[in-house]
Every structure is written in C-alpha cells, then in structure tokens.
Amino acid sequence: MQQLEKIAGLSQTDAKAQLVEALKNDAKMSAMSYVKETMEEAKLTASKEAKKIVIQTIQRVATEHAVENAVTVFNIENDEVKGRIIGREGRNIRAIEAATGVEIIVDDTPEAIVLSCFDPVRRELARLAMHQLVSDGRIHPARIEEVVNKVKRQLEDEIVEIGKRTTIDLGIHGLAPELIRMIGRMKYRSSYGQNLLQHSREVANLCAIMATELGMNVKLAKRAGLLHDIGKVPDDEPELPHAILGMKLAEKYKENPEVCNAIGAHHDEIEMTSLISPIIQVCDAISGARPGARREMAEQYMKRLKDLEALASSYSGVEKSFAIQAGRELRVIVESGKVNDKQAEDMSFQIAQRIQNEMTYPGQVKVTVIREMRSVSIAK
C-alpha cells in the first residue's frame, strides 16, 4: 500500500476522495442527460395532452344556451285590461313604473304589454306584480304598492332558494348565506347575453372534470368555478373590476385562499398563485366561447361580415365575395379569365389561413372559391 501510494503520489484518503468525486460527476451527467430527455419528451407531449383534456372536458359538458333580452312580453286576455292597467289619466301605469323601476310600453300590439328594463330582477318583479294585479282585478295606486312590496319579499325568498338548490346540485357545502344569496341573484343577471347562473354552473362542471383529469382537488375547483363571477352581482356596485370585487367578497366570507386567488386571477388582474387559477380561466373561456353562447352586438357582427368580404376582395381576380350563413361560410367568385383552377385552389387555402391568423370568430369558417367559364353565342 505504501509503495502504491509512493508511485501514485496520492494517499489512500486522497485516492478515495478522487474516486467519489469522479463517480459523483458521472452520476450528475447521467442525471442531467435523463432530465433533459424527459423535459424534451414532456414538451412534445404536453400540448397534445392539454388539447386532449380540453376536448374531453368540452365533450362531457353540454348545456343549453339561453340568450337574455332587455324586455319581457306580458300577455293579457283582452285589450280592455290595458285600459285598467293605464288607469284614469295614466295614474296606475305611473304608480307601477315608480314602484318597480321598469318602463311599461302599452301600444297597439294585441293582447300584449312590453316591460322594458336592463335589470332582470326588476323586470321579473314587475312581471309577477302585474300578474297578481290582473288576476285580482283591483288595480289602483295603493294596491299596486302593496302588491309590489309583497312580490319583492317573495322574490328575495326565491333567490335564496335558487342559490341553495344550485349548491346542493353541484355538491358544494359550507358557503356563507350571503354568497348563496348572490348565487341566486345570478339567475337574473346576464353577461354578453349569456345567463350568468347557467354560465357559472357550466364553468363549475368543466372545472371539476378538468381537475379530475389532472388529479387535483375537485371540490375546490368546482367551488372556485361557481364563484368566479360573484363580483358581477353585489348589492352595491363599486368601481372595481368584477374579478377583484369577487375576490374581495370571497375573502370577506372566509373562502379558501386558492379559491380567492382563482376568482381574482381569472382575467389576469392579479398573479396566479395556485394550479386551480389557470383551470378557472380556461373553463371560463370555454363556456363563453361556445358558438351561440354569447350574443354579439349587431355592429360587431356586421363588421365581422364586412371584414370577411373585404379580406377576400383584396385578392387579384376576385369578382365578388359574400359572407353567408351568419359568417360561417365565405363564397368567393373569381374571374375565370384571370384565375385558373390551380390558382382558385391556392386562393381558398390562402384566404382560410389569413382568416385563421387575422380574425376572431366562433366555430369555423368555410371558404368556397367559385370559378366558372361561360361561353355565349347568339344565333341571328
């Protein structure tokens, strides 16, 4: 051993230390190589797996879409009732409008009165009060106030009952009574024409499915999904974004910090600090982006159709372009002398690619390029 140490110029301890260090470096290199391979594989499969989870989630939750209006049509048996609702010199109709805050439109439409108001709770209050007044037959200012106050109390009870029923259906327990009441109020609110309670229930179910696929806390995800838009229905409406207001309400009623963060971060107003937050954001987008889920403003809709036609018309050789089927198909008619069959095929592909890259639209847009040759001869 001494001779070996003398030849090597190393003591036994130094030799051991060198050997251990060499083994460490070798193991570290192997581990780094393995980690790099695993990361590369994860990058390749992550996008595919994420798409698969999203598609499975969408397919497993299918709900009807109820688009909200700003008016309610109240049907009456005959036009004689209209006179009684209006009252002498219009005193009854003024009393109803003052008590409910709803504009009542009585016109020539047979057997119908229109209740117009942007607040669906007030509109429902007016509808129920009108129904009671017409059924009872006694319509005068004092009776109107009495009936409206009675219906208001009934509507508050119904809102609480809707909130309780929703939480029971979704299996969510331990919510504060005030949050349950706010969930009930969602039934009478809409967002871009989409019923808010229906949207929140759908988001809760989507979150539960996605959390299950990812092996996360399903109950917590479902809870955050139901409460994510709670900031749209407070009694007082301070000047705050609805996500931040919802987060503050959830914190006030001692909700889980992960749920509070998911509510506040679903429109990127605050930083996401839990894995549930991106799930809520994705599921909110899925629910709102379904074709037909939300109502587009008429101006936006018309602009989208014009933009589609203008995009196609910008190509050389295009004679006319028509956006049809509510913008789901674009028909492009080209001049046969300027565009041959191969060019027409290329044009349809290029237009489809540009629509995909430059425009925002629900569903898909089919591009059809039509080229026809017409030969006309006249016999004289």
Image (tube, rainbow, N blue to C red):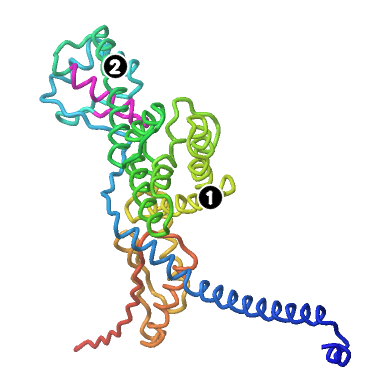
Name which of mark 2 and mark 1 comes first in the sequence.
2
Q: Quick check: 132 left or right of 163? A: left
Q: Residues within 10 Å of mark 1 (few under 14, many from 20)?
A: some
Q: Give the percent coordinates (x, y) of residue 172.
A: 35, 39
Along the line of sight, the residue nearer the viewer: 128 or 201: 201
Along the line of sight, the residue nearer the viewer: 223 or 379: 223
Q: Residue at point 71% right, 78% down?
A: 25
Along the line of sight, the residue nearer the viewer: 261 or 346: 261
Q: Residues within 10 Å of mark 2 (few under 14, many from 20)?
A: many
Residue at mark 2: 96
Q: Give the percent coordinates (x, y) of residue 306.
A: 42, 60
Residue 132 painted magenta: yes
Along the line of sight, the residue nearer the viewer: 61 or 72: 61
Q: Give the percent coordinates (x, y) of residue 146.
A: 26, 10
Q: Residue at point 35% right, 31% down?
A: 185
Q: Which SS type dominates the magenta stretch?
A: helix
Residue at mark 1: 274
Magenta highlight range: 114-133
Q: Quick check: 264 left or right of 211? A: right
Q: How many marks?
A: 2
Type of the residue with mark 2: Ile
Q: Quadrant of the C terminus?
A: bottom left
Type of the residue with mark 1: Ser
For residue 286, above or below residue 311: above
Label 1 near label 2: C-beta < 8 Å?
no
Q: Secondary structure at mark 1?
A: loop
For residue 259, above or below residue 73: below
Residue at the limit of the structure toward the top, as seen here: 142
